[in-house]
Amino acid sequence: MSTRFDLIIIGAGPGGYVAALRAAQLKLNVALVERDAQPGGACLWRGCIPTKCLLELAERRRFSAKKARGLGLGESQDFNWSKIQAFKDRVVKQNAAGVAALLKAAGVVIIQGQGRLTAPGRVEVVHAGEARSLEAPHVILATGAQPASLPGFEVNGEDILDSTSALALSALPARLGIIGGGVIGVEFATVMASFGVKVALFELTPSLTPGVEPELSAALVTALSRLQIKAHLSHAVTGLIREAGGLRLTARGPGEAVYEGVFDKLLIATGRRPQTAGLGLEALGLALDRGFVPADLWGRTPIEGLWAIGDIVAGRPQLAHAASAMGVIAVEAIAGLDPAPLALDEIPAVIFTEPEIATVGLGEAAAMARGGEVRVGRFPFAAVGKARVMGKPEGLTQIVALDGRVVGLHIMGPHASDLIGEGLVALKLGARLEQLAEIIHPHPTLCEGVGEATLDALGRALHR
């Protein structure tokens, strides 16, 4: 016998659990199916939260080791990796407990097990060898993604790592090679180098962090070099040999140049692939795109009553906050509230390197491709008083306008992840450059850089 609900959600990551909370607000009887013992998904347990814990402590150590001495505060190189890991685990568990408490208070029914569609609106959940059947007129798939593999460099969790096993290291390697120069690669490089690991990055394309403005990507290479991180761009890894001294890696660079180096461990950071295997989608006649689920900007798939959100959806950014927004939109559509579609140009992205990079909307090239008058303003953090006070003058703010309206904001510098909020509001409200220029920014603050970049786009910069 099946248990009936108004909505079944498979996956309790930031997309699924937020969708469940919104559904509960709208008085829907919702079941949240999760294979792990606790909700939170990869972001909370194996991604965003644990990596940011390590990045926060790494930033504190960098400041102590490289900046504080010059400010008369002394210098300390000591750290305890076991305590750092314990802090990370404690924060993750606290956040997970908070999510579980929210779901319980909302009345969401959490069902542990592996969910699989057996027919439209029918889900079988298997846990500990027992199966349970659920029914609902609507099912949301929110199963997320997992680290992608690289043929010839199979992850074993010992000397060849993925992001999950790298987070669980009981001791740091002396030498780490990272294959992949995207967000995961550069963030782990920042963490490891900050704690004294010798790091080399290998990226197949000519630049790091695809999708980031070229000027910021190039500046990131320079910033990483200050942490003694060597970025090998346009390098394809070609071979791996285990020997007594470690892992001998070979790569082919520009002009057929050959690289060869030895590492204690390798981190495979070549992206993430959707977790859609075993969901029963093929049996329903749903054609996947390299494992990704086709869905519109509200989350509707071609199968009636079947919705998809988050990292598994084709053509969507694999970001926790994007998944959460998609979950809310899908649930509101299910409830008949007629929500606005997902605004792809308004989804921010952040890279927690040193300095941070945050971006939203169109870059200069993308704006020019749309036609119209493009204006770009830039302002360096070296000219921002607060950045100098913090001892963090590296980076810049870039604003992009199309026909007078702000369509993009790109920041590399201290607290870029927080500063990008000004761009989010500007894009959502369709602000014009002149309107943004009228905002009185407090002094001394980092957000003054946004104001000066805006003035620069108008040809009126005052402090450069």
Image (cartoon, rainbow, N blue to C red):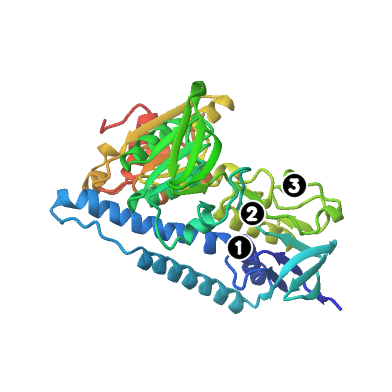
Label 3 vs 1, first from the N-terminus? 1
- Mark 2: few/some/many CA within 10 Å (<14, 14-19, 20+): many
Task: Using a 10 Å C-alpha cutoff, classify the residue at mark 3 as few (fewer than 14 neighbours), some (14 to 19) or many (20 or more).
Answer: many
Q: Any mark on residue 13, and which?
A: 1
Residue at image location 54% in from the left, 57% down from the top: 157
Decide if residue 142 is on the left or right side of residue 248.
right
User: What residue is pinned by disc 2?
Assistant: 310
How much space separates mark 2 and mark 3, taking CA atoms? 12 Å
Q: Horizontally, is 403 left or right of 422 in the view?
A: right
Secondary structure at badge 1 equals: loop
User: Residue at coordinates 68% horizontally, 70% vertically from top-left?
Assistant: 32
Q: Quadrant of residue 379?
A: top left
Q: Quadrant of residue 330?
A: bottom right
Q: Is residue 94 visible?
A: yes
Q: Please tell me which residue is depicted at 50% across the width and 35% down the height of the picture.
A: 250
Which amino acid type corresponds to the residue marked 2 in the rendered image?
A: Gly
CA separation, marks 2 and 1?
A: 9 Å
Q: Is residue 451 left or right of residue 429?
A: left
The one nearer the camera, 463 or 282, is 282
**Label 1: few (<14), some (14–19) or many (≥20) C-alpha neighbours in 10 Å:** many
Cβ–Cβ below 8 Å for labels 2 and 1? yes
Please name whichever residue, 52 or 166, is drawn nearer the observer in this view of the structure: 166
Q: Which numbered disc flags the more N-terminal residue, 2 or 1?
A: 1
**Residue 144 position (above or below residue 423):** below
Query: What's the residue type where badge 1 is placed?
Result: Gly
What residue sits right under mark 3 in the picture? 294
| Residue 240 badge | none
